[in-house]
Image (tube, helix red, strand yellow):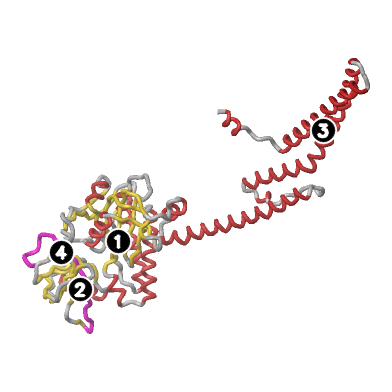
Amino acid sequence: MAKNQVRNKKPRSVRETLLLGVFWRLLIIECILLVLSVAYRGLFEGAGPEELFWYGIRIIIVVTVMMVFMMLTLRAFLNKKIIFPLETIAAANIRFAGSDPQALQQHLPEDTSREIEDIVSTRAAMLKTILDISEKRLRLVGLIREIFGKYLSEKVVDEILESPEGTKIGGRREKVTILMSDLRGFTNFSEKSDPEELMGLLNRYIGRMSEIIVSYDGIIDEIIGDALLVVFGISEKAEDHPQRAVACAIAMQNGLRRLNAEISSQNFPELEMGIGINTGTVIVGNIGSDIRIKYGVVGAPVNIAARIESNTLGGQVLIGESTYLAAKDHIHVKPPRTAMMKGMKAPLVFYPVTKIDPPWDVALEILQVENENGAAIRLPFNYWSLRGKKVISGAMYGETVRISESWIEASMENVMEPFENIRFKFEFCVDAHCFEDIYAKAVSTGNEPKGVYRFGITSIAPEDRNILKKWMKEVSD
């Protein structure tokens, strides 16, 4: 207890220390002189007690006058030469700690001692060095935030820079919502496009999507070509990340529609995007080694989000069952669909979303039209089954039964599984125009005759689409 009191006691100022030190030393010296003088007079000069008493009184008066004189003169001297310069430096340091730039240089009296002037000049040099280093560090931190904020989210950069554990390998468990988006037919388009124009279009697309994602507090974890991996709910206490992810996905689809209106006037084909969403617990943190580190998320929910996205058509937003259960009181969906995916023990369940209620209040501006009538047009074609980007079968024969702007019904040689991807090829030319590959996905409606399947179109060249639309109009007329 006594040690704590001593530790917490406020230290004396330079003024108090010097003046008290001088006073007590003068007092001790004068007391010693008084005792020696009285003793000498009594022992060697034979003075009596009364004489010694008055002799001591005279000496005390003289000593008191001398002490007052010494204290006044020494005080003025010490104030001018030592105390005032040191107090000036201390006050300047306090102002400097309060970010006062004027406290860097201090002006002292001309007759200040050399040692104190050295302290002031050394202090100024040290403070200038500290300021320069601090300014460089702030600029460097700002540059790091600016640069890496473009590679990672600003929230992630702040977490890495501000946490002592920010660069260590490892992570933490968090419940998040994963959004995965991918452009339909972009690979085919990129093969025929100028690389610079392709990069410019891709940057416009990613820039527009990034603005929307950030506005919903999403974190872009990966940009893989034309695909985006976005995470909602990292380091946030709010539990509405499933709803924000759904609202963001709908806003992204609507934003792509507006971007298409802009690029179509520049002779670019319209872009179509599929989005899959899933909610679950993942590991969030640094992945890699001491040589190469990546901040990201790992876990089954990420893979499931990718599986859900692989079943989308252009313009669709599909959500997994976990996201549906978390957000069902706020969203509008179509009946659930199921698909048996490779490596999964149970069918994958997902819901097409059409709208989310306030406070987000966003609805898909263009819905996939599954029940449109289409036109009865019979066209022969060859087709190949796909798994991902890989062709897994030889060419097979089929024939269209009905065609609309968003789907094709066709009679096929082999049995098609729901959500199976295929590549169509009309093996004929019209007015010197030969059809390019058409990519589509099998959709199960339950209304087709045996051997007839409906496919949602995921990618078609603009010229081919225009020819089919022309034929559909002629048949309707």
| Residue at the limit of the structure toward the right, as seen here | 45
Mark closer to the chain start, 1 or 2: 1
The residue tagged 4 is 373
Crowd band around label 3 with a 10 angstrom C-alpha radius: few (<14), some (14–19), many (20+): some
Q: The residue tagged with tag 3: helix, strand or loop?
A: helix
Q: Is residue 430 rendered magenta in the image? A: no
Numbered disc in front, either 3 or 1:
3
Q: In the picture, which quadrant includes the N terminus?
A: top right
Query: Which contiguous range is marked in magenta?
Result: 431-451
Q: Amino acid at mark 4?
A: Asn
Residues at marks 4 and 3 touching, judged by CB atoms closer than 8 Å = no
Numbered disc in front, either 1 or 2:
1
Label 4 and label 3: CA atoms lie apart by 110 Å
Residue 371 position by quadrant: bottom left
The residue tagged 1 is 181
Mark closer to the chain start, 4 or 2: 4
Residues at marks 3 and 1 touching, judged by CB atoms closer than 8 Å = no
Q: Is 112 above or below relative to 6? A: below
On residue 468, the disc is 2
The residue tagged 3 is 71
The answer to whether residue 381 is visible is no
